[in-house]
Image (cartoon, grey):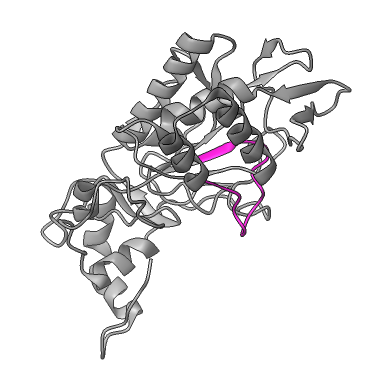
Amino acid sequence: MSRRRRPGRGPGRALVAASPLLAAACFSSPTPLAPGVGGSVGAPQHGVLTDGVELPAGGPGFVRYRPHGQHHWGTPVLVAAVERAAARVSTERGGEPLVVGDLSARRGGKIPGHRSHRSGRDVDLLFYTTTPEGAPVRSPGFLHFGADGLARVQGTDDYVRFDVARNWALIESLVGSEGAPVLFIFVSRELEALLLEWAFALGSPDSLLLRAATVMLQPGDSTPHDDHFHVRLACSAEEALRGCDGGGPRWRWLPPLEEAAPLDDALLAAIAEDEGPPAAPEDSAGDDAPQDDSS
């Protein structure tokens, strides 16, 4: 999120003057200072969350990786998208459930192991996996898959295979859903290639292939994401009016934001600095450190 200073006003002065009201605006109900702020506020790397929805510990076709964790809150649109996609894959493909990693904290802000996941629009989804022979198995954790689609299970001599059929069904459900405005799906180039090759062989529509190829991306400033999908949703026009900052391009198939007016720059800068309760130092791996028990 860009921060433009106004003449004669430093950012520190604005923060001191506004901090009591901003804390209320970010973490409870809107205030006279920011009556329209709410929902996903700020950018994924500098934001907070109000009115979040809790993803259950399990449901049709999915389970949480950390059933007793605290970082499973998101916007209603994100949580509904995960539930809908998992249920669809389960119905159409069967097999083991989707394992869902971190979303955001209940009030957003910084959480351990992540530079983003602060405003309720990010979620980590572990890959669907099979045995090398093709039998579905539940994902054993954040394993690193190579270009051959195989990953070694930590501490064993066993391997699992990237289930390209069910993983593509997941991508298809997320990207093809009008109710889930996907901005990015971070994943390694090698696994993206496997998915698109499979989709092309299936005869998937060109429009779907274009969307998937556009939003799937190996990030250049963090881990390659060869161990999970990191899904990020775009802001809707209504969310933008309430303080959501997109943090990425506006793909042409997403609803336009012409009606959304920007919030006051000083207010947005102050919100960005208020990152919620202190958290443990983030892992040096970058945007998404592995979320297994050893992290």
Name the residue rendered at 42%, 31% in the picture.
174
220 in the magenta segment: yes
The image quadrant of residue 259 is: bottom left
Q: Determine if residue 211 is in view.
A: yes
Residue that sits furthest to the right in the current view? 157
Q: Camera-side residue: 149 or 1?
A: 149
49 in the magenta segment: no
Q: Camera-side residue: 199 or 247?
A: 199
Q: Determine if residue 67 is in view.
A: no
Name the residue rendered at 52%, 26% in the picture.
203
**Relative height, residue 111 to residue 71 (above, below):** below
Residue that sits furthest to the left in the current view? 32
Please identify the dominant SS of the magenta region: loop
Q: Is residue 97 left or right of residue 150?
A: left
The image quadrant of residue 7 is: bottom left
Q: Is residue 151 left or right of residue 201?
A: right
Q: Camera-side residue: 111 or 136?
A: 136
Give the image location of residue 54, x and y in percent: 37, 29
Give the image location of residue 21, x and y in percent: 21, 60
The image quadrant of residue 132 is: top right
Q: Which residues are magenta?
A: 216-230
Give the image location of residue 134, x and y in percent: 72, 13
Q: Camera-side residue: 229 or 153?
A: 229
Quadrant location of the N terminus in the rendered image: bottom left
Quadrant location of the C terminus in the rendered image: top right
Give the image location of residue 172, x and y in percent: 46, 28
Name the residue rendered at 25%, 55% in the picture.
243
Name the residue rendered at 46%, 42% in the picture.
210
Q: How many marks?
A: 0
